[in-house]
Image (cartoon, rainbow, N blue to C red):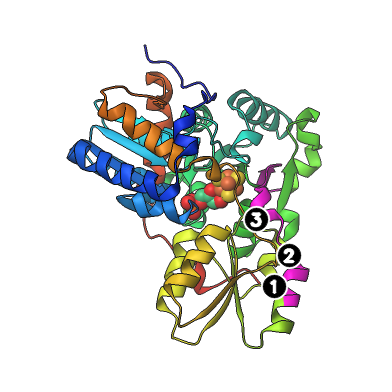
Amino acid sequence: MQHKTPRYQVRIPDKYLRTSAAELGRLAAELKARLGSDLCILGHHYQSDEVIELADLAGDSLKLSQLAAQQDQARYIVFCGVHFMAESADILSSDEQVVILPNAQAGCNMADMADADGVAAALDELSAISGDARIVPITYVNSSAAIKAVTGRAGGACCTSSNVRNVFEWALAPKAAGGGGAEKILCVPDQHLGRNTAAAMGYGDDACAIYDPDLPNGGLSADDVARATFLLWKGFCYVHQRFTPAHVKAVRRRHAGIRVIVHPECPREVVRLADAAGSTEQIIRAIQQAPAGSKWAIGTESNLVNRLAKRYGDQFIRVLSDAPALCMTMHLINLPHVVWVLDNLAEGRVVNQVTVETDEARDAKLALDRMIAIKAVRDVTKGKPD
Ligand code: 13P
Ligand code: SF4
């Protein structure tokens, strides 16, 4: 029986914290060369430049998990991202591969706003007060493996911000047509992703109701549930929720002709004012395809936006707000922790392994596999909710 990784980080030896970034970079390159094809370092787009420079492959959370599954020659996958991403990589990679999170405390604040027991209880409660309506959970990949397992067992699927609309459409399609046969969707844990996607599908605000896990029946009456097609878990990402309509208006006033593109974890009022909304990969693609001289204000994490600004120096690119939007837990992964992990691997010691218990991994994989099987991913950046 495997055991879950504790979310507690031991203090790494002082020598790593005292060493300069340049020296740590040199050490990391040396250790990478020693570990050779046994090692693959994955870096999420929100990581700092110094970590991304070390990574063999960079991507969004889903792409990285799928890349992890393809690295069959690598015994060690060092995942520079947050805990739920490393869990997905462990679920999708082979049993022989070891997934390592360089700082065990690097969790996702939004993912931590829901727990598996709470989601199972919500499904029971909502089903009871709706007179047994078929409620299918759709779980954002930003969630624990335990919640993904509850989702898999309940006939639901995972989604990412790239494919969420297709997954919602699958869930609401009749079973006879290969869909999930849902009368209602329980969208966990990000309310904004759910609300923005419902709007993009043409549903009005009244089709959404917030499920508050701290209240009996989520704070919903039988009538509220009867009216709603989308039951939205009351979670949010603090990095994206901080963007406001005032930011959009201010940036437009200051930079004539600027285009605003935002992540769908931003509030509905921000997405409504933006020119486009899309996932991390979709935002990157929009910038890649834009002509020189384009002007962009981007409503997402600052490390990614600043890297895009450097890479596409012939465009004007800035964060939507004046203050930086940093994901503090992504920041817990840094060169000292990565070099500490590599140093240990080079000595034959595995530290900070992330493992998902076998039964949980099997059920979570059901939800991940259903998502992967839902094809025809729509490019959200081509349109936006009105
Ligand atoms: P991606 O799925 O685009 O990688 O996003 C993950 C995330 O944490 C967004 O805040
Ligand atoms: Fe989680 Fe938000 Fe950080 Fe993404 S940016 S990892 S959703 S806290």
Q: Is residue 339 visible?
A: yes
Per the image, is 232 magenta? yes
Residue type at tag 2: Glu
Residue type at tag 1: Leu
Q: Is residue 178 visible?
A: no
Residue at (73, 69) in percent of width and height = 247
Q: SS for tag 2?
A: helix
- Residue 21's x, y, as percent? 44, 48
Residue at (32, 43) in percent of width and height = 28
Residue type at tag 3: His
Residue at (70, 28) in percent of width and height = 125
Ligand 1 under 8 Å from disc 1 Cβ: no
Residue at image mark 2: 269
Residue at (50, 53) in percent of width and height = 46
Q: SS for tag 1?
A: helix
Q: Is residue 364 left or right of residue 250?
A: left
Residue at image mark 3: 240
Alpha carbon of mark 2 to alpha carbon of mark 1: how far?
7 Å
- Residue 209's x, y, as percent? 74, 47
- Please tell me in which quadrant of the rendered image residue 240 appears: bottom right
- Viewer-nearest of labels 3 and 2? 3
Per the rendered image, the range of residues in magenta is 228-250
Using a 10 Å C-alpha cutoff, classify the residue at mark 2 as few (fewer than 14 neighbours), some (14 to 19) or many (20 or more): few
Are the residues flagged by discs 2 and 1 in contact, CB closer than 8 Å? Answer: yes
Q: Is residue 253 above or below residue 346?
A: below
| Pointer 3 or 1: first along the chain | 3
Per the image, is 199 magenta? no
| Pointer 3 or 2: first along the chain | 3
Residue at image mark 1: 273
Q: Give the label on residue 12, or none.
A: none
Q: SS for tag 3?
A: helix
Ligand 1 under 8 Å from disc 3 Cβ: yes
